[in-house]
Image (cartoon, grey):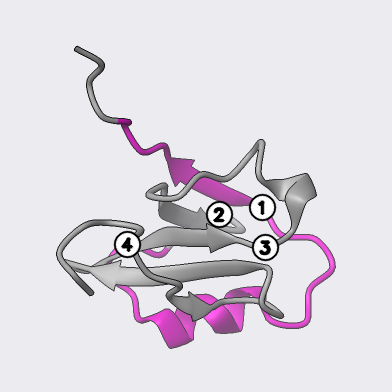
Amino acid sequence: MNGQRGMHNGTPINEEVIYVYISSFSIFISRVSLPSLSPMLSVGDEILYVDDELVKGRSLEHVQSLIAGKTRVVIVLLPSVGPALC
């Protein structure tokens, strides 16, 4: 990673629809490949909960196991804050 959040493809978390990267015990969205999800997910959003389970500080493998094979999942995000416009 080059030090800027969201500046690489990341790791696929579920059938290459949502890509994430890990930074300081947090998991962030780095790319969304399904256009219908892009209004809800943004690069840099932090994943806090998956199906009511706190995932902050958990491994990527654990988060993947919570999502794998499901047709429906509830994800709670902390939205990213865009750059200030001057």
Q: Which residue is most to the right?
A: 71
Q: Which residues are magenta?
A: 55-82
Residue 54 screen position, x and y as percent:
41, 59
| Residue that label 4 marks | 56
Element type at marker 2?
loop
Quarter of the picture holding the C terminus: top left
Amino acid carrying label 1: it is Val
- The circle drawn on residue 33 is 3
Pick whichever of labels 2 and 1 is earlier in the sequence: 2
20 w.r.t. 5: above or below: below
Q: Residues within 10 Å of mark 1 (few under 14, many from 20)?
A: few
Q: Residues within 10 Å of mark 4 (few under 14, many from 20)?
A: some
| Residue that label 2 marks | 52
Nearest to the eye among marks 2 and 3: give it: 3
Amino acid carrying label 4: it is Lys
| Residue that label 1 marks | 74
Nearest to the eye among marks 4 and 3: give it: 3
> Along the horizontal axis of the image, is 67 left or right of 54?
right
Element type at marker 4?
loop
Element type at marker 3?
loop
- Asked if labels 1 and 2 touch by Cβ distance under 8 angstroms, the answer is yes
Pick whichever of labels 1 and 4 is earlier in the sequence: 4
Pick whichever of labels 4 and 3 is earlier in the sequence: 3
Whole-Å distance between the Cαs marked 3 and 1?
Answer: 18 Å
Amino acid carrying label 3: it is Ser
